[in-house]
Amino acid sequence: MKTINGQTLKLMFISGANNLYNHYPEIDALNVFPVPDGDTGMNMNLTLSSGIKEIQNRNDTSCSAIMKAFSNGLFNGARGNSGVITSQIFIGFARGVGDKEELTLSDFLEALQAGVANAYHVVNNPVEGTILTVVRESTQKLADEFNESMSFKKAMDILISEAKASLDRTPDLLPILKQVGVVDSGSAGLVRIFEGMRSALSDKVIERDDEATINNLMSHTQKAQIKIEEEEFGYCTEFILKLGPKEVKKDYSSSRFKNFLEAHGNSIVYAENEDQVKVHIHTLTPGVVLNNAQQYGEFLKIKVDNMTEQHHTIHEDYGEDIEESAASDSSETPESSDNAIAPITKKYALIAVSSGDGLSEYFKECGVEYIVSGGQTMNPSTDDFVKVINQSGAETVFILPNNSNIFMAAQQAADVSDSRITVYVVPTRTIPQGISSAFAFDESLDPGDNFNNMKDALNSIRSGEITHSIRDSEMDGINIKKDDIIALTNKKCVYSGPSKVEAIKALAKELIGDDSGIVTIYQGEDVTSGELEELSTVIKGEFKSAYPDIEFDVVEGGQPVYSFLVGVE
């Protein structure tokens, strides 16, 4: 094979994305910190899936056409730092392809090199020992060994071999990886993509293995994330399935099938009657559900309604739902999949990322007009931000991402939003920082002064969080056991043990200084009434005695993952 066309390239990316999907739970499990927020594999998977959606039904033989569509989908669907960087690798690849109808191996290598350059360009402070290192070193290895007679299969073998070797070296470049005994998760995801692409060259396009993926290290948090997303953005799917015949269909297990349904959606109604199964489910992936069901029988009835039209508003104050439309592929620069721009009717709008009804309401009280649902394990995409920006009707928009893993997607959205709208991304890494920044906003000031004041406000807040450990580990000299309550601040562990309130005490000791005046504690969805009573007793007694000049305030946040978020001003 001396050249590949657009259809071959499409199959390579589909196979790569499917291979990533089949392994993303194990990539999530490579989380450095032993907390239930590992989402690298999920973010890369959702990002690649957005790209595949744009090309899977295209019949173009032109590599240029396929790559333009693919890159648009990647850009709009990119979420999390790992997803954004992955998208930028292949967006750069697309630019390297240019207007070529077919690719020689030399063209393919040049496109990879363009992808490496683009990924490094978009990251302000590139860190080695990450996906950037692995894509750079593997591409350089291919360049070093390249010759005109080399086949595409051989080239991919070289690329994969060096990517794996580079992956194994990541702990030597990032000490934290070596400390906890894992390799870089984003790099592991890239290896899976390359492996899937190579398989397609041997006419073995990898298919999605839904059952294996569900059973392969999928965490409770990830299932909860899927269900939350499906509840807001899914499809109401109903069907009646006639089981069998056994000669051509798989043996049916109701418990196994119900477990599958629970992992792929919510609002499930399930009923059996002799050889028929009736199902109602809200799901993001009706095709996956229907394909799995058809292994056991044939459909007597199917109904799928798109709930996006009813639920894809990101904030309850939107006058109308924002309709999703196909991403444009008419330009080299990816565009938003939603071209609807609201008339400019006001000077300012504040957008904050929040998860939890209480937190969202609190942000509104602080002057935030639009809430993008998300946070740890639920990173919104670039397109999620673009839609809110374009619908805000404001001349100037301030985004509070409130999570370091969301900042890149927000910044990417700012770069491509409508030219009439000026967008500032305030580098808020935590919810308490976001709230402090929102308080600093003053509508009477000009945009630049507001941005500077909102950034300066970050220096006045110290943040911490309390969650539970998902595995045995050791951090900062503290021995952590699976299921321990742990307290973290600035990626430092200050407590591990059985008590959430004791964890708050440890955080208070770490965060409160001579200049502190207010401590705000945001309670999560898993906090019990007994724990709140215990906390109240501590605040009125022990804290009042130890910190007589400091005001303590407990706010019902309702956030998942973290039992408590703590901000000290």
Image: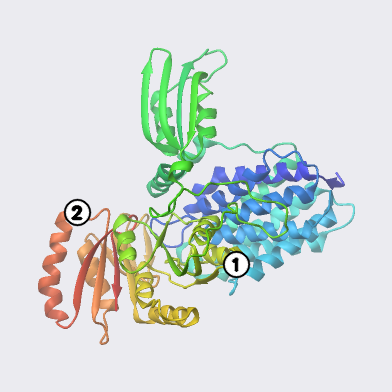
393 or 20, nearer to the observer: 393
> Label 2's element?
loop
Three-letter code, disc 1 = Asp
Which residue is situated farthest in the bottom direction here? 514
Q: Residues within 10 Å of mark 2 (few under 14, many from 20)?
A: few
Q: Is residue 537 left or right of residue 57?
A: left
In this rendered view, identify the residue nearer to me: 498 or 107: 107
Towards the viewer: 455 or 118: 455
392 on left or right of 490: right
Residue nearer the viewer, 504 or 415: 415
Residue positioned 71% across, 67% down in the render: 117
**As drawn, 102 above or below 345:** above
Q: Is residue 302 left or right of residue 167?
A: left
Q: What number is the disc on residue 528?
A: 2
Percent position of residue 173, x then y? 57, 70
Secondary structure of residue under mark 1 = helix
* Residue 260 visible: yes
The quadrant where residue 378 appears? bottom left
Q: Which colour scheme is used?
A: rainbow
Task: Count residues near mark 1 (Cα–Cα under 10 Å), then give few for <14, some for 14-19, many for 20+.
Answer: some
Q: Name the residue under label 1.
A: 415
Q: Residue at x 58, y 75 (%)?
A: 125
Residue 278 appears at what percent x and percent y? Answer: 41, 21
The CA distance from mark 1 to mark 2 is 43 Å
Q: Which residue is drawn at 36% across and 22% down?
A: 271
Quarter of the N terminus within the rendering: top right
Q: Can residue 375 be seen in this view?
A: no
- Mark with earlier residue (1, 2): 1
